[in-house]
Image: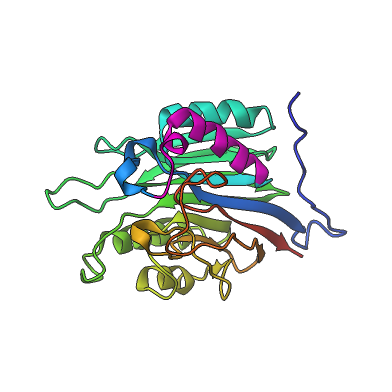
């Protein structure tokens, strides 16, 4: 039997004049596409933990355990999405997947258990590869009605680029700028949440661009490493939100350069991040 949908806390004596109170949990998680799993890249992980079916089952348990109203996932392949969809539907969630272009095997997905979803859009960035083709990276934007207000959630996986590349040429920065200009600044009346794998760390220009656009970092002052690719622990996963919302971020498990990822308890090379967002 499907789990009941947990409603927002929405209340106001003067609904026609005052914004309604809101409380929800949102999570973001790069789940590691099977296409990018090579045993030599994960020397500290037993081979049986890298098998697709076992990881899919472990991912479903890990995601369900987050108990989030909205879950934004990156590096999601069609087979994995189908498995997660089956598991999450039994818990009262609906999901949507948008794949990258240019032959990439993965994309972004959003699962939610909210009653009023207004639709979704996959926006493909216009930044180009060295050979002139568009990169194929995207932002998946899903809209919700929360007590008469429009909540817009953008899930993205910004493209990694060399840190020494000039900002005006940096592809991740180009994608971030496009997302902010065409969506967040283009719809300032909406409540916004922008989250995902940014492939950048706190304090770097790409991350600062989201604050400059008027969004708040849910983990500001509380950042912990979210992955340790290439034996270097770093925080590259983010949840940004409109200033009208207040965030209570989850504390993450301890992660250092040598922590095995994936592991028995963590089925990806990233940790999921989550926060409770409130509007009094």
How far across and down, in percent of the image, does residue 187 sit? 50, 58
Residue under the point 50% across and 61% down = 238
Look at the picture and state if 172 lies above or below 37: below
Residue under the point 72% across and 63% down = 279
How far across and down, in percent of the image, does residue 45 sit? 43, 45
Residue under the point 51% across and 62% down = 255
Over which residues does the magenta segment extend? 44-65
Image position of 280 (left or right of 142): right
Q: Is residue 75 magenta?
A: no
Q: Main secondary structure of the magenta part?
A: helix
Identity of the residue furthest to the right in this view: 13
Residue under the point 78% across and 62% down = 17
Identity of the residue furthest to the left in this view: 131
How far across and down, in percent of the image, does residue 39 sit? 33, 41
Residue 254 falls in which quadrant of the image?
A: bottom right
Look at the picture and state if 62 lies above or below 212: above
Q: Is residue 64 magenta?
A: yes
Q: Nearer the viewer, residue 175 or 32?
A: 32
Quadrant where the N terminus sits is top right
What colouring does the structure picture have?
rainbow
Q: Nearer the viewer, residue 128 or 157?
A: 157
Quick check: can you spot residue 178?
no
Q: Nearer the viewer, residue 36 or 131?
A: 36
Quadrant where the C terminus sits is bottom right
Quick check: can you spot residue 23?
yes
């Amino acid at each position: 039997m499907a789990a009941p949908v947990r409603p927002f806390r929405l209340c106001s004596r003067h609904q026609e004049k005052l914004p309604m109170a809101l409380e929800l949990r949102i999570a973001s998680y790069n789940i590691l596409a099977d296409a990018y799993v090579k045993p030599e890249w994960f020397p500290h992980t037993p081979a049986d933990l890298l098998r697709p079916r076992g990881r899919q089952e472990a991912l479903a348990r890990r995601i369900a355990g987050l108990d989030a109203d909205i879950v934004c996932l990156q590096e999601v392949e069609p087979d994995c999405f189908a498995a997660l969809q089956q598991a999450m539907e039994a818990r009262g969630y609906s999901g949507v997947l948008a794949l990258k272009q240019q032959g990439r095997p993965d994309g972004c997905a959003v699962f939610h258990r909210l009653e009023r979803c207004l639709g979704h859009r996959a926006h493909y960035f216009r930044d180009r590869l060295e050979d002139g083709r568009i990169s194929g990276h995207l932002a998946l934007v899903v809209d919700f009605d929360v007590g008469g207000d429009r909540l817009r959630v953008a899930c993205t996986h910004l493209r990694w680029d060399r840190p020494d590349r000039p900002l005006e040429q940096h592809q991740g920065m180009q994608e971030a700028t496009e997302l902010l200009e065409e969506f967040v600044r283009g719809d300032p009346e909406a409540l916004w949440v922008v989250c995902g794998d940014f492939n950048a760390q706190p304090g770097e220009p790409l991350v600062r661009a989201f604050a400059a656009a008027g969004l708040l970092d849910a983990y500001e002052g509380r950042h912990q490493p979210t992955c340790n690719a290439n034996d270097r622990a770093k925080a590259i996963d983010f949840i940004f939100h409109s200033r009208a919302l207040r965030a209570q971020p989850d504390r993450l498990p301890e992660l250092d350069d040598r922590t095995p990822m994936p592991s028995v308890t963590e089925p990806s090379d990233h940790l999921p991040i989550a926060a409770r967002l409130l509007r009094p």
